[in-house]
Amino acid sequence: MTVLVYAEPSDLVAWTGQEAPANAEVLLRSASILVRQVTRSAVYATDTDGLPTDAATAGAMLSATCAHAAALAGADVDPLAAGTDAGVASTSIGSASISFEASGLSARAALRTQLCPEAQAILDAAGLMGQPPLVWRS
């Protein structure tokens, strides 16, 4: 099965106004997988490859993909390093111990499996999220 990718590195450059990160294709692929996941029950016309043909739908998916890829890049998350942000809340050696807030680690880890709020808002505004499944009865 081919993974649908809704944006190119040049789209990410246009979205952020910055040079594309070295792993832009990986970030966009990972973001596209999440966009596809949250829009799985949305109804829209596609081409033979499965990409949306309606300009508004394609634009929303491109924008959401770029927004999430930018969030991944901004948080320095490497989708290929899944599970490496587990973090440690405290540790000790002998009588010395150290504790730290691990919430930043969990927020970074969440970006691997959940779209960032901006990407969700883009898709929601386009009517591509929260659609109930279609059921036909004869």
Image (cartoon, rainbow, N blue to C red):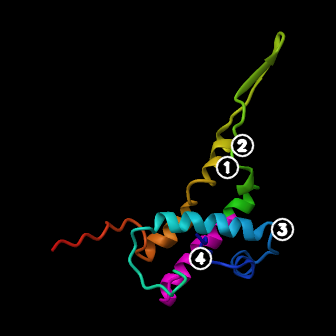
Q: Residue at x 47, y 64 (%)?
A: 38
Query: Circles 2 and 1: CB distance less than 8 Å?
Result: yes
Mark 4 neighbour density, 10 Å: few (under 14) some (14–19) many (20 or more): many
Q: Which mark is residue 108?
A: 1
Q: Is residue 22 magenta?
A: no
Mark 3, residue position? 22
Closer to the chain start, of discs 2 and 1, is 2
The quadrant of the rendering that contains the C terminus is bottom left
Q: Which mark is residue 85?
A: 2
Whether residue 77 can be seen here? no
Q: Please provide percent x and percent y for residue 9.
A: 74, 77
Closer to the chain start, of discs 2 and 3, is 3
Q: Is residue 58 above or below residue 102?
A: below
Decide if residue 13 is on the left or right side of residue 2: right
Element type at marker 1?
Answer: helix
Mark 4, residue position? 63
